[in-house]
Image: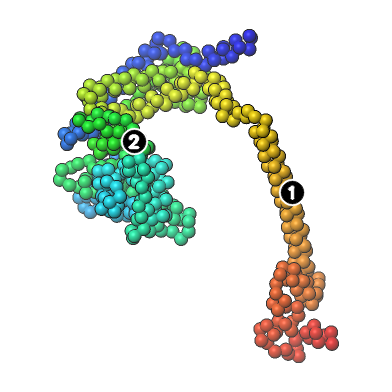
Amino acid sequence: MKQNRNEKDEKRAAYPKCDRLDVLIAVCCGSLAGVMDVLLVGSLGSFKGRAIRNSRLGSLSDRTTDELVMNCARLAGWKPREGKENNISSAIGYFERNFKVNYDQKNSLETGGKLALNTKNHHIKSLSHMPDAAGLFFSVLDQFMGTASFLEKGELIRIDAGSNSIRLEGKDFPAKLYCGFCNWLGHLISDVAGSSGSRGNATGGRGMGLAMPFSELFQLCRFGKFQIEKDRQDLATLMSRVYMAGYDARSFTAASYVVALEEMMVRLLWAIRKTYARGGLMVRRSMDSSAVLQNPQDASDLNMMLLIGNGTLCLIDGTHAAVKSQGNMLVFVLHMNLPAWIRFSMLVLKEVGTQLGTTADTLTAALWEYLLQVDTSLEKRQIEAFYLRVRDSRETAEHLFCQFCEEEENRYQEECRLLDACTDPSASAEVQARRSAELARGLGVPEERIIENPGKLDRLFGRKYRKTDPLPMEEENK
């Protein structure tokens, strides 16, 4: 009973103990962030050609991305003509010319009609254009294999792009791997702010940038029926249309500003309150996750406040999106703050794991025990016999390996002894020659290639014997 009580006390110590003021602080921070999301983020795309993009933070993110592309171009050697120093189309064109790849197909004709591809969706369908680990993997793979990888209707489609004149530079594999990485990164920079053609036309459009990180996973979700006006489409098609409507990586970054601000406000106010409640400097600890985790109670309280604050932000964001969408799921997603919902899901999973504690470990162990359960005696005997065979095989392999190492060590020592004898300065030239011949025979050198005396050396180089030369060994023996 005492042990059970101690375990319960330890679990209770890890539970959050947020009071009303902590909850009020989290709700206020989340509400303020939600209002900013409605006023400054708003919609991040357009629907049926009607621009509903009224996002001030989205415009800020677009301008920041343009500045980033131009700064990267200057570092890479971009030298624009006079008057083009701040021309984003010229900077994008520099990357497009210098970081060409073989997987940049833009329409169905270039893919041989194997998939429905156009200039608006080829970034989200091409796996190599993803700004994440999967994109890097498929980019390097496609550059080495001369292929292009796409996701179409939940299936992986790879087409042959070997006829393309683009080839990886480098003399060896590491050099080619490095060039493949540089091509992937440079090509992403050329696409993150749209193409040079779309940014240089008279309409002044923002172009089709890169898709959100890991959004390629949505292309595998061929399920669900979501209402888009009079059509009902699955999740993969819905997210493709969300990207084509303008919700790209730049929009994702713009929405992330509000999430980052909300979390910083919660952490700062929590630290200030703890400072006055306990004394001591807590501000730095609130920003350092490893320091916070040193005190389980502090970590639990802070995580709960972050969860409440982010939940409040998501509640306001979801309500705003539902009001604006009027049942249209495409408009609903365009008004959603996806980074906030992703962060909220992560916080929920973290809190569930914290609350379960050892219960989760117990359930996992019970699951493994159930999956690996052996019922019959025959199965037990078979497993024991298999274990014995594995053990015997391992012991035999270890014995053979030790024997092999011992033989190789003895052979190496013998060769070293002969080699030292061949170069012994106290021995005569004839003795050194005989020892050298013995060493050569031990190493498997053919007899006709072994030089035992100066006579064989003369015959090898075609030099006639002179009286001033020392007598060959055969003549000395005679």
x and y percent of residue 37 in the render? 28, 25
- Residue identifier under label 2: 222
x and y percent of residue 193 in the render? 27, 43
Q: Residues within 10 Å of mark 2 (few under 14, many from 20)?
A: some
Q: Residues within 10 Å of mark 1 (few under 14, many from 20)?
A: few
- What amino acid is found at the position of numbered circle 1 in the picture? His
Q: Label 1 vs label 2: CA separation?
A: 55 Å
In front: 395, or 76? 395
- Residue identifier under label 1: 399
- What amino acid is found at the position of numbered circle 2 in the picture? Arg
Residue 21 is drawn in which quadrant?
A: top left
In front: 12, or 154? 154
Q: Is residue 421 visible?
A: yes
Residue appearing at x 23%, y 27% in the figure: 328
x and y percent of residue 441 in the render? 74, 71
Disc 1 vs disc 2: which is toward the camera? Answer: 2
x and y percent of residue 45 in the render? 23, 34
Residue 123 appears left or right of 266: left
Q: Is residue 423 visible?
A: no
Residue 370 appears left or right of 204: right
Model colouring: rainbow
